Amino acid sequence: MNRRGAIAALAVGTAAVAVLGTTVAADGSPGRGDTEREIEQALHDHHPRNVILLIGDGMGTQEITAARYYQGVHNKLNVDRMPLTGFDTTWSVKPAPKAPYLPDYDPDSASTGTMWATGVKTLDERISQGPSSAINVPGRNYQSVMEKARKRGMKVGDVSTAELTDATPAVQGAHISLRGCQGPTDTAASCPQETKAAGGLGSIAEQEVDNHFDVLLGGGRARFEQTVTGGRDKGATVVDSARRQGYQYVTDANGLRGAKDDRPVLGLFNSGNMSLEWTGPTASTGKGNTPAACTENQRPANEPSLADMTSKAIRLLDNRKGFFLQVEGASIDKQDHATNACGQLGETVAFDRAIGVALDYQRTHPDTLVIATADHSHTSQIVSEDAGGTGLPTGYSTNVVTKDGQTLTLTYGTAGYGGPGAAPSANPPSQQHTGATVPLWGIGPGAAAILGTNDHTDLFHTLGG
């Protein structure tokens, strides 16, 4: 069923519910009446005042399901509070002198982020630029949905547990041919024609600051401490440039708590990616480890949680003209790459807590559109615990004990080929993305647009592009 058919069917179903009547749970929790009102609003109101987009990097259906099962099969996640769901395809394109561009079925975060940020298909590694004949040939810059929102007078914010210059946060506030050109030094080495010294827009860090977003929170301090190579701030660091442009600069949880809404805020809480929430057993080939629970609450106290950053960002952005906030749970992907099951699960649960913050705000501000999704799918699979050891998966496995007291086995099978009869390669050790569709969840004005199976470029229009 396509989007139009799905919306029509939902409208009929909603009308039937209205005739039959609704109920509210005896304990006062949201009941059928709340769901009906939410669906009515999603169908008929297409003008949200606020938009909150939450991206679980690499959070395909297996990753979110694993987190749901780990927390206990009868304990719903916050994302399960959202009444509407759909799926998006995520294919990117390969280089060519001109359209049509051939599809690449297994994309990266740069190309997929560019899809919802700009509505355009592009090459892997590329940040909010269109495709071109080769990866070292810059494409056309396309305005992001958040840049459009800022021009309409909305406040805008970008939050991530990765370096703020990583691909997913970068797509909203930067335009560059290679995602690795994160700071001025990186850009001079890999994107020389796009540096400020060469008359370009500069690195991702420089562009994010120059774009004057109201809130920038995450990791990546080392990128912003690199020296600007051209323009007004030549010889200064990107942090110095941000301060000159009026940013409050904070580096820990206490500093974030004290930030005021009278000036834009730049918060950089780690020199690289922010610290993980959970740790646990190491993956191995064969049956893997003796089942063990994950060790929780491992994030250093000086680093704010994703939920805390989301809550503070909403408070800083909330205003009568509306806001657009993008929030990324980045290390779901990074720990999937690393076959770190507990790291992956912990980051997914932390991301779900941030979804809870957004939904709590939406409940009292129903003119807010909230959408949660992933940029692309990833490798982890839930498989049988196979107590006999006779049907083991061929990749790396980890066995964790869930809140139900049962074994949850996750396997990772997209690492480098090790040769005939050999174990998967440890060089490179990284597991690879996969090309499956990704789930979307939505609530609020215009959320019905996610219904059915669409493409990630369609999300740009749903978000107000």
Image (cartoon, grey):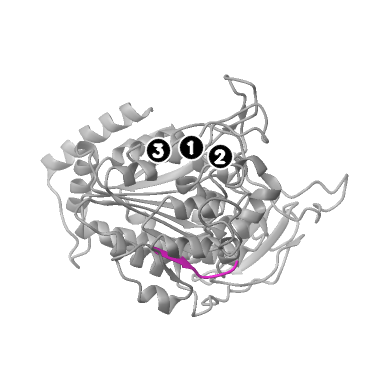
Point out residue 377 in the picture as x, y percentages from the top left corner: 56, 45
Q: Nearer the viewer, residue 153 or 365?
A: 153
In contact (CB < 8 Å): disc 1 and disc 2: yes
The residue under label 2 is: 111
Question: Which quadrant of the figure has residue 267?
Answer: bottom left
Secondary structure beneath dot 2 equals helix
The residue under label 3 is: 459
In contact (CB < 8 Å): disc 2 and disc 3: no
Secondary structure beneath dot 3 equals helix
Of the numbered discs 2 and 3, the one sitting upstream in the chain is 2
Callout 2 environment at 10 Å: few (<14), some (14 to 19), or many (20+)?
many
Please give the range of residues in magenta: 265-271
In contact (CB < 8 Å): disc 3 and disc 1: yes
Q: CA distance from mark 3 to mark 1?
A: 8 Å
Residue 13, above or below 406: above
Callout 1 environment at 10 Å: few (<14), some (14 to 19), or many (20+)?
many
Number of numbered tags placed on the structure image:
3
Q: Amino acid at mark 3?
A: Leu
The reply, left or right, for residue 397 in relation to residue 357 is right
373 magenta-colored: no
Give the label on residue 354, or none: none
Quadrant where the C terminus lies?
Answer: top left
Q: Nearer the viewer, residue 384 or 265?
A: 265
Q: Amino acid at mark 1?
A: Met
Point out residue 179 in the picture as x, y percentages from the top left corner: 60, 46
The reply, left or right, for residue 437 in relation to residue 286 is left
Q: Nearer the viewer, residue 375 or 32?
A: 375
Point out residue 109 in the picture as x, y percentages from the top left corner: 56, 46
Callout 3 environment at 10 Å: few (<14), some (14 to 19), or many (20+)?
many
